[in-house]
Amino acid sequence: MKNAYRFLACLLCLLISVNSVAANGRTLLPEQTIAVLAGEISGETAKRNLEYIARHHRMRGSRGFRAAAERIVEQLRAYGLKDARIEQFPADGKIFYGTQKSRPPWDAEFAELWELHLDVFGKWVRKARLASWDAMPVSLAQDSESGEVTADLVHIGAGTSERDYVGTDVRGKVVLTSSQPAAVVPLAIKRHGAVGIISYAQNQRTAWYGEDENLVRWGHLDTFSPDPTFAFMVSLKQARDFQTRLVRGDRVRLEATVRAGKHAGSYDVVTATIPGADPNLRNEEIVFSCHLDHQRPGANDNASGSVAILEVARTLSKLIREEKIEPPARTIRFIFPPEIEGTITYLNARPEIASRIKAAIHMDMVGGGPETKAIFHVTRGPNSLPSFVNDVAEHFGEFVNDQSAKFASGDAADYPLVAPEGGKEPLLAEMAPFSLGSDHQVYTDSSFGIPAIYLNDWPDRYIHTNFDTPANVDPTKLKRAAFIGGASGYFLANAQSEHAAEILRVVQVNSLRRAATMLNRRSILDQEDAENLVRHHVRYERTLAASLERFFRIPDNARASAKTFLDNLERQLAPVNPLPGAIHDVYRRVFRRRASLKGPMTAFGYDYFTDHFAYRERPLLLTIYRGLHGSGGDYSYEVLNLVDGRRTVQEIRDHVSASYGQVPVETVFEYLHALETIRVIERLK
């Protein structure tokens, strides 16, 4: 404990001694550039574009997605990005792009669900329309197939266990379930003979879970299921009405008509560039990423991210044309794909572009207003990929936090970044550690190794529901997100050796904050895990400082200064490096990834690992493991990322334990062995 207090005192001295940009009010970009960016970026323009996109039900390869994509291209060209286009990649359910099995496009023409009642002549006639594709596309589950059914309704609860069917005959009936439709197909449809599904699955679990009875959740069926069916989504209010009547013994009879299905087509990916001006750097790229798909209205998720990067494109193009800022040294690219699967497809199909990308700025849900209860995050990359790129984003995020908080408090603020039609609340962005859940995890997967900034809202009480509407999106929030992303991307597009010292000062301030966080974690660990945590923290900071070399050569004086800082930091932390104990030979094994297979194991609507690995009586322990700071998905993603042809199994275990909490080495080895059996990785002799 004394050592911890001693370090905190030294840390305070170091913070005071570091000539940080935060301390003296400077930013990484010149004041004039900050001023013109803040003045030009328009939350209202972004929201006008959002209102158009939110009119479309934007499933991959669908007519709705195509309409939204064509609108994006039209706007990009109007903004001066003349090479804006839609690139198409065949998707038929068989073609693979790296780890992504292409999902065929899905469209619906018509779908209605009616409740029937007996008229005075004893004939079943329509009483009330409960769902309509035309009125609310989200009421039809994605990947539903055509069907016409008139049948009674039966409640099966979750419907995912045989006990849910005991004493209940569902053959020839429509089942009512609290689960997502895909989860009940194997038992309800295939085994027990139900003819359709109605789901009242609730939204992602947050503090507001299940509170709003009127939400209709976006539903999914399995694209590759051998048992085609259809499913309608209803609100909790409607489901409770059904349940009450069924318990009372009433007969609920329904008529369902669906004309929908999958078809051959393509992934459509919009792309456009602002060409780099430096002949030595123009073949390097900074990417602005989003995902254009999702259910209608899908305003915050993710029309907001799509229009935020569109607004960055408009702003930069206009300011360059007006000669208010210089053209970027590196090329800036904008990509609008279907979520995750489109990004895996694009980077695999266009390897020449993937190889040129130095960093990505990904925006997924960046406009949530107060009603959404959203907290805005500037999220770092995984610990397996340390990069100064994330410190640049945090630098601009903290700048907006500071300016918006001063303005909200009535203090003087030069750049409050408030949209005339938007709110005036402080941003209060959280500088967050890595989390999974969007396209950024494709870029940072080690098969690509591209540092990525992830700007996102969470929680969001209306995500994936009919209430994710433009009315709940705040123009001020859009403006601020576009500024953080735009400033970060523009700086990175121009970053060169002369910026090294300034970047390292930003990195050093953040390094001290990370050290303080690490010390808090260390205090609850036993000696072995505490020492492991310190070792990996020091290694992370050294690798992060060296990451500038991905962009340019670090000048000797800046390199020497960084080394001095890091040496001092290591001395203060006093990491213990004991000789390793006995390690079983099997944990000394070293693996490398197969270079020909690129992408993470899990995508959107397809899981490469599950599809290729023959599960036995139980799931692999790592995939369901819960540590102090992470769960199975975090561990398995990072374990694969750490396979580099040099680290042993034990070293990979130590690394993920430092990131997410202690995990048994046997559990890590079991997963690596499984990856080896499906030829994702191979063992080095």
Image (cartoon, rainbow, N blue to C red):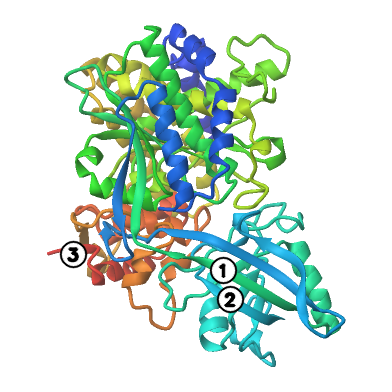
The residue sitting at 45% across, 25% down in the picture is 312
Task: Answer left or right for 363 relative to 551.
Answer: right
Residue at the outermost bottom position = 167
* Cα–Cα gap, marks 1 and 2: 6 Å
Disc 1 secondary structure class: strand
Looking at marks 3 and 2 on the same chain, the residue that comes earlier in the sequence is marked by 2
Q: Residues within 10 Å of mark 2 (few under 14, many from 20)?
A: some
State whether residue 474 is above or below residue 123.
Answer: above
What label does residue 683 carry, if any? 3
Disc 3 secondary structure class: strand
The residue sitting at 47% across, 75% down in the picture is 228
**Label 2: which residue?**
148
**Label 1: which residue?**
258
Looking at marks 1 and 2 on the same chain, the residue that comes earlier in the sequence is marked by 2
Looking at marks 1 and 3 on the same chain, the residue that comes earlier in the sequence is marked by 1
What label does residue 176 carry, if any? none
CB atoms of marks 3 and 2 within 8 Å: no
CB atoms of marks 1 and 3 within 8 Å: no
Q: Residues within 10 Å of mark 3 (few under 14, many from 20)?
A: some
Amino acid type indicated by mark 1: Val
Q: Is residue 207 visible?
A: yes
Q: Position of residue 23 (x, y in %)?
A: 51, 14
Task: Answer left or right for 188 relative to 486.
Answer: right
Q: Quadrant of the N terminus?
A: top right
CB atoms of marks 1 and 2 within 8 Å: yes
Q: Quadrant of residue 640?
A: bottom left
State whether residue 376 is above or below residue 347.
Answer: above
Q: Residues within 10 Å of mark 1 (few under 14, many from 20)?
A: many
Q: Is residue 436 visible?
A: no
Q: Position of residue 20 (x, y in %)?
A: 45, 16
